[in-house]
Image (cartoon, grey):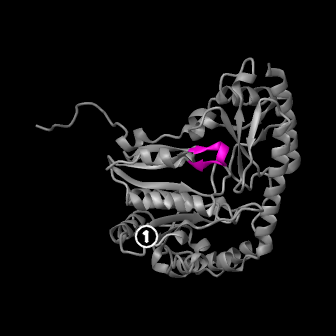
Amino acid sequence: MSSRPSTWNVPASKVAKRAHNPIRQIVDKLKIDPNAQKQLISLALGDPTVFGNFNVDDSCNESVIKHLQSFKANGYPPAHGTEQARAAVAEKFNHPDAPLTSRDVILANGCSGALDLAINALCSEGQNMLIPRPGFSLYDNLAVSRFIEPRFYNLVPERSWEADLDHLESLIDENTACILVNNPSNPCGSVYTEQHLRDILALAEKHHLPIIADEIYCDLVFEGNTFYPMATLTKEVPILSVGGLAKKYLVPGWRVGWVTVHDRNGIFREVHEGILSLSQLILGPCSVIQCALPDILHNTPQAFHDKTIAQLEHNTKVSVEGISKIPGLTAVIPQGAMYMMVGVNVSEFKDISDDVDFTQKLVAEENVLCLPGQCFGYPNFFRIVITPPADRLEEAYSRMKEFCARHHI
């Protein structure tokens, strides 16, 4: 006799049931009034292309068009990326203290795809991984859906969001698989000093823990700060660095990311093969963009990057000045990337219970949308994306000031 059920019963898989997105769970509850008197200003989406003031350099478009029109970029590329594209990434990020060859590069579908490869290659069901709080929600999502326990180490706002190393170390046990470090940071806009990165590496070496370095915002740093690729600061700790085109080149929709494997001592031999095997499950990024990748990485003029950073720095200045004039709010000044975290001093408001309540009422009354800190595991803060045009930011902070004045004690 068949053991099949006598009626339809098709449940979702365990992985599907565990997949979740805390941002969507919170944002979907924010009610945006379609008939609002004021135009919506969204400071929520980390996409620099939305307002049209940040655009990819013309040379990148020209390279894509050239390869598109060649009719030679329409077939299946190797799953882990073409040799030319991987060699271009290796050459771009090669460093005397962290040498790379094309073999050390695996291309992926955006930096999110690269994170997926890295986490799946390093972590097994039942293990735990250490991730920053506040931190990008995808880290938690990927871990939980793979039955990996996320353990959140605190970042300290009073120290420009440096990691609390004592707290981080207290989370380590025999089941810890890796430490994830995001620098420059989403959502904090922090840029770690060389010494702080070395301190994290010393802790990782002490406990023989590999690191996943999320460096998608590499080089997007403001005056007075320096980006240090984590792999250049150690000869002992094996590191999987992940990055991509999305932010630095202002093309998040082109979906090209990569994992670079930094392993001086053969510790990642099995992991490296594992990433290659995982990359074979689904073909990698778009063939046309892969063909254009050498031009994009090596021929984009530095003036383009300088202009991007100058505009981000200006918008940061506008944002810090705007928020500093609003009683009840405290900005943690960013040092890079595209974001700023703002504290909500709940005790100064008569009818604001927390960051979610603040953002819900702000969008309802002023049609300004921000993400509450609970999206990133950090209550009583909210995140501002600083990529809208400066005049839109100024208008948003003017409305925010009016909103806070109405609700302030």
State which region is magenta.
Answer: 155-163
Q: Label 1 neighbourhood size at 10 Å, few (<14), some (14-19), many (20+)?
A: some
Q: Quadrant of residue 270?
A: bottom left
Q: Taking 287 as reference, is 254 above or below it?
A: above
Q: Which residue lies under the disc numbered 1?
A: 236
What residue sits 56% from the left and 60% below the top?
A: 197
Magenta residue check for 160: yes
Q: Taking 130 as reference, is 270 above or below it?
A: below
In x, y percent, where is residue 160? 67, 49
> In this view of the protein, which residue sits in the foreground, 6 or 15?
15
Q: Is residue 399 left or right of residue 50?
A: right
What residue sits 44% from the left and 66% below the top?
A: 237
In x, y percent, where is residue 61? 73, 72
Q: Is residue 354 left or right of residue 377?
A: right
What residue sits 71% from the left and 53% below the top?
A: 338
Q: Quadrant of residue 324?
A: top right
In x, y percent, where is residue 316? 80, 51
Image quarter where the N terminus lies is: top left
What residue sits 65% from the left and 43% below the top?
A: 157
Magenta residue check for 182: no
Q: Is residue 113 visible?
A: no
Residue type pointed to by label 1: Glu
